């Protein structure tokens, strides 16, 4: 399957999820009043939610009222917001949640009885709490990222998270869960850029040799040029000579990567320039993880 086929399939899945999430009374939803009065619905929610104390507490405190599976507009908006958030989870450096979204869609499609809807209700809440907790606290203990990071990973309150979804405009509430710092948003943009570069085939061949400097020319300089172009430090051109433009590009690269800024592509600079895109992406994701843990 080509990249375009994969992206097309992902797009079709995405819009299919939204269509189902926004469907009306005839297609999905018990109706809030019916659900609240159904013993089968309440029992199913209680059983399914029992594996997560926060989710179970939310439903006990709300007399097992439906948050997601009603046929009302508020419920359909919550479903749409959650499914979109799961589809876009990887944009935040989180594990791909599109499979979870697809599983939830299948459960919704298959729901027929009050008990079915109760199980779907609890499954949607569990998926939402898991997603929100990953956003708010990060995936890892800080010390597993860096021995020098002594911060503890914060616990989140799943009950409060569900109350927030109940009481707020769904899409707006989900936006409040994402770190708002300029640094985090810049990292997200860089992550997307690097993923696009991976799909395009990476940054090209690595640069051979141990040192290149102004005035040099030849195949190694061409490889350096192409690498700098791919990484966004030079405009596309056909030069085979280490000229002043390339020197300035190397200086910008060195400055951005904490290297000595001298315009010479020595061993340290070439090692950094030759880093695979996936290694750079991993570094960005770790930085995003730190941002989530600090938010």
Image (tube, rainbow, N blue to C red):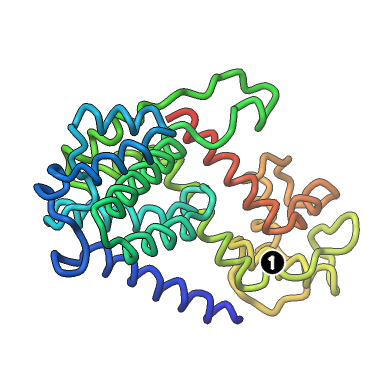
Q: Residue at x 82, y 57 (%)?
A: 213
Q: Which residue is mark 1?
A: 203
Label 1 element class: loop
Q: Residue furthest toward the left?
A: 33
Of residues 217 and 293, the one nearer the viewer is 293
Q: Position of residue 163 (x, y in %)?
A: 23, 33
Q: Residue at x 12, y 55 (%)?
A: 72
Asked whether residue 87 is in view, the answer is no
Q: Is residue 284 left or right of residue 166?
A: right
Of residues 173 and 127, the one nearer the viewer is 127
Q: Is residue 223 above or below residue 139?
A: below
Q: Position of residue 183 (x, y in %)?
A: 45, 40
Quarter of the picture containing the C terminus is top left
Asked whether residue 131 is in view, the answer is yes
User: How many numbered circles are shown?
Assistant: 1
Quarter of the picture containing the N terminus is bottom right
Q: Quadrant of residue 37?
A: top left
Q: Position of residue 227 (x, y in %)?
A: 71, 65
Q: Position of residue 172 (x, y in %)?
A: 22, 46
Q: Is residue 240 left or right of residue 5?
A: right
Number of residues whose C-alpha sits closer than 10 Å to that of mark 1, classed few (under 14), some (14–19) or many (20 or more): many
Q: Is residue 122 left or right of residue 230?
A: left
Q: Residue at x 84, y 68 (%)?
A: 220
Of residues 122 and 127, the one nearer the viewer is 122
């Amino acid at each position: 399957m080509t990249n375009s086929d994969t992206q097309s399939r992902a797009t079709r899945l995405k819009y299919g999820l939204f269509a189902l999430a926004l469907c009306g009374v005839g297609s999905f939803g018990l109706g809030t009043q019916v659900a609240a009065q159904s013993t089968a619905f309440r029992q199913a929610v209680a059983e399914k939610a029992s594996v997560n104390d926060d989710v179970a507490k939310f439903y006990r405190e709300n007399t097992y009222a439906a948050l997601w599976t009603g046929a009302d507009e508020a419920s359909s908006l919550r479903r749409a917001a959650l499914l979109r958030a799961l589809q876009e989870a990887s944009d935040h450096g989180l594990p791909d949640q599109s499979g979870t979204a697809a599983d939830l869609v299948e459960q919704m499609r298959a729901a027929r009885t009050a008990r079915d809807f109760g199980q779907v209700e609890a499954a949607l809440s569990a998926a939402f709490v898991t997603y929100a907790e990953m956003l708010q606290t990060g995936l890892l203990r800080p010390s597993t990222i860096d021995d020098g990071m002594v911060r503890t990973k914060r616990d989140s309150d799943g009950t409060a998270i569900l109350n927030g979804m109940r009481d707020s405009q769904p899409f707006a509430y989900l936006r409040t869960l994402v770190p708002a710092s300029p640094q985090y948003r810049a990292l997200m943009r860089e992550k997307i850029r690097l993923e696009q570069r991976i799909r395009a085939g990476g940054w090209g061949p690595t640069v051979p040799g141990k040192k290149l400097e102004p005035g040099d020319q030849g195949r190694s300089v061409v490889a350096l040029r192409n690498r700098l172009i791919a990484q966004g430090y030079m405009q596309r051109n056909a030069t085979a000579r280490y000229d002043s433009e390339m020197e300035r590009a190397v200086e910008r690269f060195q400055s951005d990567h904490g290297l000595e800024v001298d315009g010479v592509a020595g061993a340290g600079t070439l090692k950094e320039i030759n880093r695979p895109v996936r290694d750079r992406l991993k570094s960005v994701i770790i930085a995003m993880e730190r941002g989530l843990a600090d938010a």
